[in-house]
Amino acid sequence: MSKSAEYVRSTVAMPARAALREPVIETRGLRKEFDGFVAVAGVDLRFSGTGVFGIIGPNGAGKTTFFNLLSSFLKPSAGTVLFHDQEISRLNPEAVSRLGIVRSFQISSIFGHMTVAENLLLPMQRRVTSGCEFWRRSHGLEAHRQAIHDIMDQVGIASTWRDQQASALPYGLKRSLELGISLATRPQVLLLDEPTAGMSSQDIGRIIDLIRSIAEERMVIMVEHNLRVVSDLARQIIVLQQGRVLTVGTYDEVHSDPRVIEAYLGGKRGIGGHGHA
């Protein structure tokens, strides 16, 4: 297990070195029901350190519901979510974001009618105001000029796009801007929902490099169907099945686990390294 990224199921005894590191995020007995259907069934997890943690599983495994519970877009039927030992499961999503847990959505959520710079300005101003100050755009753009430039450079968007409408960006750069918007909030934990969905192979490679760089300084928890991305990025992988944790480990450990093979493919063959979860 990597020293810089640790994952521990709370029902399993922790190694001595992991016990010295307090969890950043912890779920205790996390459960979510929809009209009697159990989507997440008493999940106990602890996430510590930095790096990428991948969440995979077959369709209907509860991945998106679990993600929505972490970010407080859904409230649990039972159990809790803790962030640095503070219960956050009853907070609204905005409050959770202000604490440092930021979610980037599966479907690109940029404001197409605004410029690239304005898209990045909004979360910067919301860090220190209620958000209404955003409409003083010219002042904000000047005050945050360097920060906007730095984020554009970090996510690989050329400065020539700065004052162009975000709707004009190619699809891959729109996803990069989405990550830039998330970074502009200065998150401690970044939740990524299928960050490479719909991308070309070239764009996927670029986003993999970007996420790897982002995760050097913070925790990234990622739901991703593309197993190439998972194998390249995730130091620890959590496999969900029917709302429960099936197994946890490195990519090599989980992709050859008979339980995972059975869950995905009925035990007929392995879950190859470049397919889709």
Image (spheres, rainbow, N blue to C red):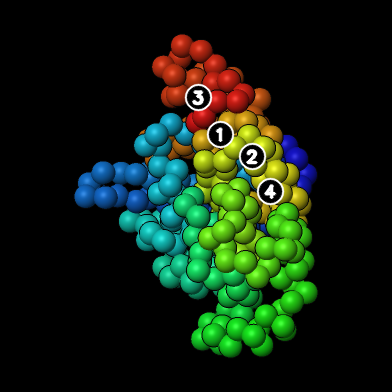
In the image: residue 201, left or right of residue 94: right
Query: Pointers 2 and 1 in contact (CB under 8 A)?
Result: yes
Amino acid found under the numbered disc labelled 2: Ile
CA–CA distance in space, label 2 to label 1 = 10 Å
Residue underneath mark 1: 226
**Of callouts 2 and 1, the N-terminal one:** 2
x%, y% of residue 101?
Answer: 57, 63
Which of pointers 2 and 3 indicates the residue nearer the eye? 2
Q: Name which of mark 4 and mark 2 comes first in the sequence.
A: 2
Q: CA distance from mark 1 to mark 4?
A: 14 Å
Q: Is residue 155 above or below residue 197?
A: below
Q: Is residue 216 visible?
A: yes
Identify the residue at image location x=51%, y=64%. 112
**Residue type at the position of mark 4:** Ile
Mark sitting earlier along the chain (4/3): 4
The 10 Å Cα crowd at callout 1, few under 14, some 14 to 19, many 20 or more, is: some
User: Which numbered mark, 4 or 3, is in the foreground of this view?
Assistant: 4
Q: Mark 3 or mark 2, which is nearer the start of the sequence?
A: 2
Q: CA distance from mark 1 to mark 3?
A: 16 Å
For residue 211, the mark is 4
Q: Position of residue 2 (x, y in %)?
A: 75, 40
Instruction: State which mark lies toward you, 4 or 2.
Output: 2
The residue nearer to you, when weighing 245 against 192, is: 192
- Please tell me which residue is depicted at 62% across the width and 24% down the height of the picture: 273
| Residue on which the image places disc 2 | 204
- Contact, mark 1 vs mark 4 (Cβ under 8 Å): no
Which label belongs to residue 260?
3
Q: Residue at x 22, y 46 (%)?
A: 36
